[in-house]
Amino acid sequence: MPDFPKLFIPGPTHVPDDILEVFSYPQIGHRTPEISELIDCITLGIQEILYTKSDIYLMSHAATGLWEVGTKNSVKNGVLHAVNGAFSSKWALSSELNGFKCKVIDFEWGAGIDVDTVDKSLSSGEYDVFAMVHNETSTGAMSDLHAISILLKEKYPDVIWLVDAVSSMAGVKIEVDKLGIDFLLSSTQKAWGLPAGFSICSVSDRLLKKSESLTNKGYFLDLLTYRKYFVKQQTPTTPSIPHMFGLKYVINKIKSEGIENRWKRHVEMAKYTRNWVLSHGQKFFTKENALSNTLTCIDNIKKWDINKINEELLNNGYRMDRGYGKFKGKAFRVPHMGNIYMEDLKDYLNKIDEVLCRLKY
Ligand code: PLP
């Protein structure tokens, strides 16, 4: 096997050998009792991790496809997008390109979503769908789902709520039913700690009802297509069976760790990283009231040479993040999710410390 550096980028995240091994299990047929048993087991596990009784659909494509599943199956009048980073911005673009009536509320990158601003926009009554990214991977900003939940329940109970949780699902406690989230989506390469190319969503009954009232959804992204096969514990198309083996394995790992312990581990790793940042005289790129539990985005005010640090870390077996897009070198990120445990994180940050020392920072 090639000896690639250990990933310390916020996705794809590190996948250890025990999980990789599961990906080479013999294949099973996708219309067999074996697959139904596997899907049943995965569904129950994910429902427990997401605190929901909603349907769970498994899709053999990237999470970006789920943005369009969400909107195609819900938007009748218009969709309001909260944009506070690169991924929420791309989701809004996808809605525009799909021809939906679409409004964007722009927040500062690095900030969380402000509930009063969402309230003001929804009060026009023009939008029947609200779409947001829970954890903006580009900036490390995690928004407050509870505040949005209260707003929607109290003032806009008919608005369908779509939430991208690509870099928070399985790393942060999200109580789907209590919050009233209609559509929660993720792919597998972040806090689930699996290879990329597979995605997961929870779908509320009222979203399925809304979908029934809509036309021009096509076939592949229509939730009703998934529903038809979900009741048989199958998927409409031939799925990535290795990902399903992987998911089952990771769900069991999460259960052995203990679900509450998993949330606690992510909080503790986030705190450790934040202390490390401050003790090095750096600042957070993210606003302090929106710091993520799964990654930390650092404003490089000490002007460390990130490319040089990257080179040194590569020589020591680590692939670091150098910042998203336009922030490259100015704001870099430390992921702490999925298969990263406190010991891995400490080893990584110690290695950066050694490099900083060598570079005389
Ligand atoms: N949403 C967020 C918050 C992300 O971080 C990413 C990828 O990094 C995506 C969506 C897109 O995910 P995928 O590459 O699985 O389509």
Image (cartoon, rainbow, N blue to C red):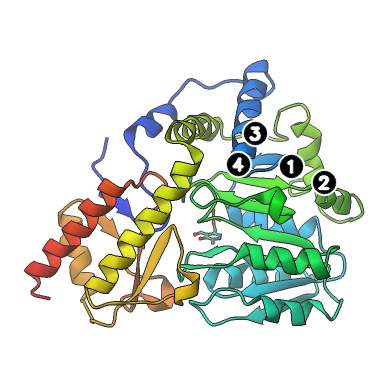
Q: Residues within 10 Å of mark 4 (few under 14, many from 20)?
A: many
Residue depicted at 44% across the width and 75% down the height:
288
Residue depicted at 79% across the width and 63% down the height:
153
Q: In which quarter of the image is residue 165?
A: bottom right
Does 161 appear above or below 123?
Answer: above
Does 28 appear above or below 63?
Answer: above
Give the amino acid type for the residue marked by disc 1 in the picture.
Ser
Q: Is residue 241 visible?
A: yes
Percent x, y for residue 311?
Answer: 19, 64
Identify residue for label 2.
205
Q: Determine the residue located farthest toward the right in the rendered image.
A: 213
Give the amino acid type for the residue marked by disc 2 in the picture.
Asp
Alpha carbon of mark 3 to alpha carbon of mark 4: how far?
15 Å
Say whether disc 4 or disc 2 marks the residue closer to the N-terminus: 4
Say whether disc 4 or disc 1 marks the residue closer to the N-terminus: 1
What number is the disc on residue 43? Answer: 3
Identify residue for label 4.
60
Alpha carbon of mark 4 to alpha carbon of mark 1: how far?
19 Å
Does 175 appear above or below 142?
Answer: above
Q: In which quarter of the image is residue 30?
A: top right
